[in-house]
Image: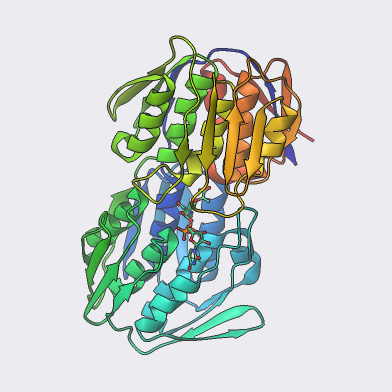
């Protein structure tokens, strides 16, 4: 198992190119099951979750080739079974269920288990698919689904679930008639998925708003599509500039999708200027803690909660962070405490009191964004920090230590 070793305290300076978005690429890859023809994707990040998805697609009968950010896919000989061993390692794999039902009328997909950040059920996905005519039973931990051609339906989501919205958009793309999704999630990655499907001949409108309309079509054709840049990776590096009192310029930064994050970082005292081509983040003087709550988009993203907490740990004053999406996403708190942070947890809220300096220590990553938060804290801490169990980081950050090293961080990967 690998760990990252960081000697903190160096202000980062230079340029970082933002990679393609993991959370946009995953549903787009799985949506290619719906397509009758060849799909060419570019800007696909080289990550463990992407490799897992390509493996799953191959098991489902798709030809999949990855070459330096380009993916070539052809779902020519589909099979309806997604095995537990793959679904277990990545929740997003459940998104193959709807596309398989739409193409084959049957599917057997392992029920994804809980994960470190919460129970995360898929009840809203299944409820929506049932409204479209699918019938499910659970057998030996697998969801077995059957249907004739799926039928368009009027679906109201109890909660604007990201994966649920993506799943139902995919299934509805090949359903008979119109599907209307109300209280749909509005995340930019959902917009990217809808744009991809439209490029394949789907008829989706309203994506990016809370009412999405999908006119089902008979079939989808191949296309070439570039995945959007990763807003969470970009946000993480903006925080890195703040943590180290450095100056970082991001190339290919999805600025519009980062509005809520940039607004909070400015409120804390950072200067962030520029546009999608080049966005520069600098710090001139002390930063201040703020209050914030994570919310569905366009609110502050839960996937940036851990990172901004790291920044508040070394800022002046006190602030309260409330987690509004997941019930168990504060596992980084006890690790930050090992570095000398002052954080008090109370239910879904964490009160952070800034300290002058963090001190390096050995810490353990518990999930993807918690790992990023610990690396950020290590960059600011005095002395050496070892971040263990970084396989989480490899699921979602492309070459993080290489990118940070190129802008001055003293960081290296070592085997435990
Ligand atoms: N929920 C339900 N029932 C459902 C679906 C969701 O109760 O059927 C609940 C979940 O338990 C959770 C909340 O709704 O408490 C939000 O879940 P959502 O479905 O919106 O999230 P997701 O699709 O499972 C995606 C991202 C996450 C990101 C969330 C929220 C991907 C592959 N994953 O997850 O990304 O945190 O949306 O924005 O897109 C990450 O990248 O680190 C990550 C965890």
Residue 279 is situated, as x and y percent measured from the top left of the image, at 33, 24
Above or below 338: residue 394: below
Q: Residue furthest top?
A: 285
Q: Quadrant of the C terminus?
A: top right
Q: Is residue 401 visible?
A: no
Above or below 82: residue 240: above
Above or below 181: residue 6: above
In this image, 105 relative to 115: left or right?
Answer: left
In the rendered image, which quarter is residue 36 located in?
Answer: bottom left
In this image, 114 relative to 29: left or right?
Answer: right
Q: Is residue 158 visible?
A: yes
What is the count of numbered marks? 0
Residue 299 is situated, as x and y percent measured from the top left of the image, at 37, 45
Residue 152 is situated, as x and y percent measured from the top left of the image, at 27, 80
**Residue occupying image coordinates x 30% and y 51%:** 225
**Residue occupying image coordinates x 46% and y 9%:** 285
**Residue occupying image coordinates x 64% and y 70%:** 84
Q: Quadrant of the N terminus?
A: top right
Say which of 10 and 299 sits in front.
299
Q: Residue furthest right?
A: 416
Name the image colouring: rainbow
In this image, 110 relative to 45: left or right?
Answer: right
**Residue occupying image coordinates x 52% and y 38%:** 321
In this image, 142 relative to 232: left or right?
Answer: right
Residue 42 is situated, as x and y percent measured from the top left of the image, at 36, 46
């Amino acid at each position: 198992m690998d760990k990252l070793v960081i000697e903190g305290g160096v202000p980062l300076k230079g340029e970082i190119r933002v990679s393609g978005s993991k959370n946009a690429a995953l549903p787009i890859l799985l949506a290619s099951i719906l397509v009758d023809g060849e799909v060419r994707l570019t800007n696909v990040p080289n990550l463990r979750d992407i490799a897992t998805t390509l493996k799953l697609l191959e098991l489902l009968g798709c030809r999949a080739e990855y070459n330096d950010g380009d993916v070539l896919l052809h779902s020519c000989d589909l099979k309806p079974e997604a095995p537990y061993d793959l679904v277990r390692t990545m929740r997003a794999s459940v998104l193959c269920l709807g596309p398989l039902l739409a193409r084959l009328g049957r599917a057997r997909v392992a029920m994804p288990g809980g994960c470190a950040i919460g129970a995360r059920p898929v009840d809203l996905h299944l409820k929506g698919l049932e409204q479209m005519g699918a019938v499910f039973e659970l057998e030996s931990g697998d969801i077995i689904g059957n249907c004739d051609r799926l039928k368009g339906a009027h679906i109201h989501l109890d909660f604007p679930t990201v994966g649920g919205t993506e799943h139902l958009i995919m299934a509805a793309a090949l359903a008979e008639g119109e599907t209307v999704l109300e209280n749909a999630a509005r995340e930019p990655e959902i917009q990217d998925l809808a744009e991809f499907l439209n490029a394949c001949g789907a008829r989706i409108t309203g994506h990016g708003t809370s009412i999405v309309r999908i006119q089902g079509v008979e079939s989808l054709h191949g296309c070439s599509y570039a995945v959007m840049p990763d807003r969470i990776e970009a946000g993480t590096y903006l925080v890195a500039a703040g943590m180290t009192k450095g100056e970082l310029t991001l190339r290919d930064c999805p600025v519009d999708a980062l509005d809520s994050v940039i607004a909070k970082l400015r409120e804390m005292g950072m200067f962030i200027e520029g546009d999608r081509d080049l966005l520069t983040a600098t710090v001139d003087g002390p930063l201040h803690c703020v209050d914030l709550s994570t919310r569905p988009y366009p609110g502050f993203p839960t996937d940036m909660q851990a990172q901004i907490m790291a920044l508040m740990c070394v800022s002046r004053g006190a602030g309260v962070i409330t987690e509004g999406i997941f019930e168990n996403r504060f596992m980084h708190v006890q690790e930050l405490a090992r570095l000398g942070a002052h954080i008090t947890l109370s239910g879904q809220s964490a009160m952070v009191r800034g300290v002058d300096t963090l001190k390096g220590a050995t810490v353990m990553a518990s999930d993807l964004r918690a790992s990023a938060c610990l690396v950020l804290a290590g960059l600011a801490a005095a002395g050496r920090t070892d971040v263990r169990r970084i396989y989480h980081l490899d699921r979602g950050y492309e070459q993080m230590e290489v990118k940070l090293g190129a802008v001055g961080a003293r960081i290296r990967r070592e085997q435990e």
